[in-house]
Amino acid sequence: MFISETQVEIRYAETDAMQVVYHGQYVVWFEIGRTGLIKDLGFHYADMEKAGFVSPVTDIQLSYKRPFRYGEIAVIRTWIQAHTGIRTTYAYEIVNEAGDVCVTGSSVHTVVDKETFRLVKFKKEFPEWHAVYEKEKQAL
C-alpha cells in the first residue's frame, strides 16, 4: 500500500485566536494530501476536469486527536482505503513533527460528468487510473 506524504507549514491565517489550527482547515489539508497522492501515482486531477469530469466529495469524516499550532509542520499521509470503480475512499492521517497523530479521517468521492453531474464509471472513463487504484486496493 502506497502512502503519500505532503508537508504543510502552519500559517497564521490557518489558526484561530488561540493560534490553534481552525477545524475547517483540515478539509483543505485533506485535499492537499489527496491531490498529492494522485500526482504521486502518476495522474493529475486537472486532466480529469479537462476531460469533462469532476470528483465531488460525497462523505467526509474527521477525528481530532491533538491540536496543531501556528509555526508547526504538519505531515499529511494519504492513501486509498477503498475503491469500487464507482466510489473511492481516501484515508488521511495528519501527524506533527514528533510523529504524534493529530487528525485522522476519510473522504468518499465519485466521478460525475461536469455538465450534467451524472455519475459515471471511473473504470470506463479512466481505465489506467482505475487499474492503479485497483492495485492499491489489493495491497491493503
Image: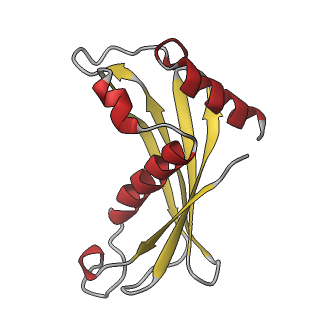
Question: For residue 138, what is the image quadrant?
Answer: top right
Q: Residue at x 57, y 82 (%)?
A: 97
The residue closer to the viewer here, 40 or 117, is 40
Q: Residue at x 64, y 35 (%)?
A: 82
The residue closer to the viewer here, 133 or 41, is 41
Where 69 falls versus 95 (above or below)? below
The residue closer to the viewer here, 81 or 130, is 130
Residue 59 at x, y percent in the picture:
44, 39
Where 138 falls versus 127 (above or below)? below
Residue 120 at x, y percent in the picture:
42, 14
Residue 114 at x, y percent in the picture:
26, 22
Horizontal relation, residue 130 to residue 136: left or right: left
Q: How is the image coloured?
A: secondary structure
Where 61 falls versus 124 (above or below)? below
Q: Is residue 56 visible?
A: no
Horizontal relation, residue 42 to residue 10: left or right: right
Q: Residue furthest front?
A: 42
Residue 57 at x, y percent in the picture:
39, 37
The residue closer to the viewer here, 20 or 138, is 138
Pick the quarter of the image with the C terminus.
Answer: top right
Question: For residue 70, what is the image quadrant?
Answer: bottom left
Question: For residue 8, what is the image quadrant?
Answer: bottom left
